[in-house]
Amino acid sequence: MPSTVKDLTTYVPMNNTTEFCLDTNVLYWYTYPRYMIFSKRGTQEHAQSYYDFVDRLVENGNPLLTTRYNITELINIVEKHEYDIFCAMHPEAQYTRKDFRRISEERKKLKRILKTTLSNVNSICETADFNFTEKILNNCVNTLDEHRCDVFDFAILSYYKENKHLNIITDDNDFASVDGIKLYTANTTSLSS
C-alpha cells in the first residue's frame, strides 16, 4: 500500500511549494478540451473532481510534473477518442483507425486538437524525460506479484520514487498497490483499501 491515500474531493492543499505528479487520466481530463463529448454522465462528474483539484493547484502555483510516457499515452487516448467521435458522427461508414488516419481533413483536425492539448500540458506541467531501461523492464517483471501496474506505469512510478516525486494524482487503482507514494484520488476502490 502507498504511504498515504488522500481523497482529493476533500483534501485542501495548503503548501503551494508541494509538487504533484499528474497521471495520464488526469492530463486527459484537464488538458484535452473534447473529453466530455460522448462521455457518460457519471464519468463527467467523476472527472470534474480531478479537474477541480488540479485547477486549485494551478491557481495556487504548485509545481506539476508529468512524463514523456504519460504524454505518449495521452496522445494515443486522444486519437482514439477523436476516432470514436468520428465513427459516431458517421455511423454509415465502417472505418478502422488506420482508415481514419488516411482522411486528410480528420488528420488536420486531430493535429490541431493535439497541438492544443500539448500546449495545455506544457502550460501547467514540467515534463520529465527519462530512459526506459532494461533494468526497469526486469524490475517490473521480477516484482509483478507485488504490484498491479502495467509496464509503463511501473516505469513512471519507479522514476518518480527514485527522484523523490512522491505526490501522485491518478484515478488508476493499480497505483494503490505501490509502496512509498502519496496517492491523491477520487477512486473509491483506492480510498477504501
Image (spheres, rainbow, N blue to C red):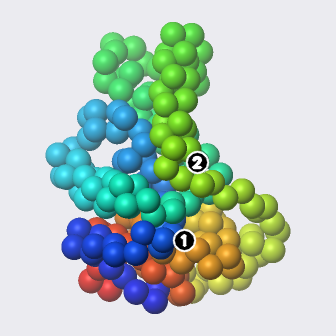
Between the C-alphas of marks 1 and 2, the distance is 17 Å
Q: Residue at x 54, y 53 (%)?
A: 125
Rendering quarter of residue 87: top left
Write down the residue under mark 2.
71
Say if residue 85 shows up in the picture: yes
Secondary structure beneath dot 1 equals: loop
Rendering quarter of residue 55: bottom left
Q: Residue at x 54, y 87 (%)?
A: 180
Mark 1 Cα shell of 10 Å, populated few (<14), some (14-19), many (≥20): some
The amino acid on which the numbered mark 1 sits, given as a three-letter code, is Cys
Residue 176 at what x, y percent from top left? 43, 79
Write down the residue under mark 1.
149
Task: Left or right? Give the position of 168 relative to 47.
Answer: right
Say if residue 79 shows up in the picture: no
Q: Residue at x 53, y 87 (%)?
A: 179
Residue 98 at what x, y percent from top left? 58, 24
78 lies above or below 21: above
In the rendered image, the quadrant that contains the N terminus is bottom left
Residue 113 at what x, y percent from top left? 48, 27
165 lies above or below 68: below
Secondary structure beneath dot 2 equals: helix
The amino acid on which the numbered mark 2 sits, given as a three-letter code, is Ile
Q: Earlier in the sequence, mark 1 or mark 2?
A: 2
Mark 2 Cα shell of 10 Å, populated few (<14), some (14-19), many (≥20): some
Q: Nearer the viewer, residue 88 or 106?
A: 106
